[in-house]
Amino acid sequence: MPGWEERPLGVVCTIKPPKSEARAKLADTDAVSFAPMEDLGIGVKYLQPHRTRPLAEVNGSYTYFADGDVLLAKITPCFENGKLGVARGLMNGVGFGSSEYIVLRPAPTLDAEFLYYYLARPAFLEEGAGTMTGAVGHKRVTKEFVESYPVPLPPLAEQRRIVAILDEAFEGIATAKANVEKSLQSTRELFTERLHAAFSQRDPGIADASLSEVCDITSKLVDPREVEFADLPHVGAGNIESRTGALIDVMTARQEQLISGKFLFDETTVLYSKIRPYLMKVARPDFAGLCSADIYPLTPRPGLMSRDYLYHLLLSPAFTEFAIKGSARAGMPKVNREHLFAYRLALPSCDQQQRVTANLDEIDAQTRRLESIYNAKLAALDELKRSLLHQAFSGGLS
């Protein structure tokens, strides 16, 4: 803002205060706060350490900080996600934590909470991300970028006025987001309850069957490099959205340069991902294509089970619980074919199945419409935060 002096961060902050401060005031056996990266929040102003350790145990390779310091994550993706916070209420006023922290100690002319909000701006995070160096997955924002980044220095009274305005506004936004998220969760729970009710009730007059009696896996593995298969769309577990069955970012076998065997499927098939069944990845594709060998292409038997009934059954809480119990294994949980087909279900008539699935599809559509509305509200609240941060440091808050 015109009239505000700007100084580099390296001038108005001490970067990486020396550990000798802690050693000078504490004994090796004295407790200090310990804060790994998980304790540094996103959109949370204050660092929240939940544990303590003796000074001697952490004084070596961990990063030192004290009450009033501002912590900033320097490694990807923590930096881009905006992991930063102000340290306060530390055990004995001292803390140690991740070596991936940049510690900034503001000079008396710079309020720590004002600095927190300034660094939380998307403009700072985006610019810093563009300077990151290092190997993929281990990129870090450079020391030179942080030290040279300009910080506005209005009078302390003005800094604190801006902090107070942002505190009040962000508290209101947080309350609004919590209410929207609660409504969103309630909407999803309602659909889950309807699914549970549809498939957990066992009417004595309805026949009982195993999944092996009502559907099959008839597809064989094919080579996706062959001409007749190369341009077919390919669905992997990562292309199926959890719980909704939406197919996302689907490409052809040729585009993905696939070489291992894949299953064929068509519009009569239900795709069920056998990896991590708790993710509930089930889809009803409206096209023919190839699917990963980690997906079961299930074809319901005509006259016994409808495709839509099978789809909803595989998303039901009862089936998901059954699948999870049968997938316990070291490493990657998977549902084997024998366990899958052993599942027993109530098998109503095809007319009854149609009524059940029509009702569930209607509720599902209503749920998705509400989710879209709620997600739009959440996005608007996030945009409001961005706008307020921009206004705060361009003189727009009066």
Image: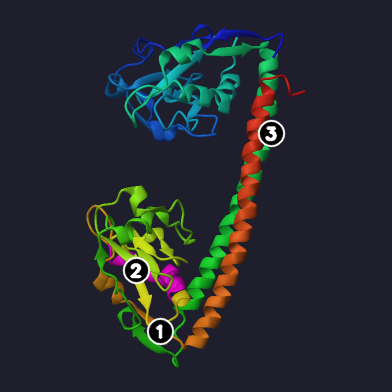
First in sequence: mark 1 vs mark 3:
3
Is 187 magenta? The answer is: no
Magenta highlight range:
310-327
| Residue 224 x %, y % | 28, 57
| Residue 3 x %, y % | 71, 8
Majority secondary structure of magenta residues: helix
Identify the residue at the far front of this view. Answer: 227
The numbered disc on residue 302 is: 1
Secondary structure, mark 3, is helix
Q: Hey, which quadrant is residue 166 in on the image?
A: top right
Is 319 magenta? The answer is: yes
Q: Nearer the viewer, mark 1 or mark 3?
A: 1
Crowd class of label 1 (few under 14; some 14 to 19; many from 20; radius 10 Å): few
Crowd class of label 2 (few under 14; some 14 to 19; many from 20; radius 10 Å): many
Q: Nearer the viewer, mark 3 or mark 2?
A: 2
Identify the residue at the far bottom of this view. Answer: 205
Residue 184 as seen in the image, left or right of residue 350? right
Amino acid type, callout 3: Ala
First in sequence: mark 3 vs mark 2:
3
Work out which quarter of the rendered image holds the N terminus and state it.
top right
Compared with residue 345, is residue 94 higher up or lower down, i.e. above or below? above
Amino acid type, callout 2: Pro
Distance of mark 1 from mark 3, alpha carbons?
58 Å
Q: Label 3: which residue?
A: 169
| Residue 252 x %, y % | 38, 54
Amino acid type, callout 1: Pro
Compared with residue 328, is residue 122 higher up or lower down, i.e. above or below? above
The numbered disc on residue 297 is: 2
First in sequence: mark 1 vs mark 2:
2
Which one is in front, 185 or 239? 239
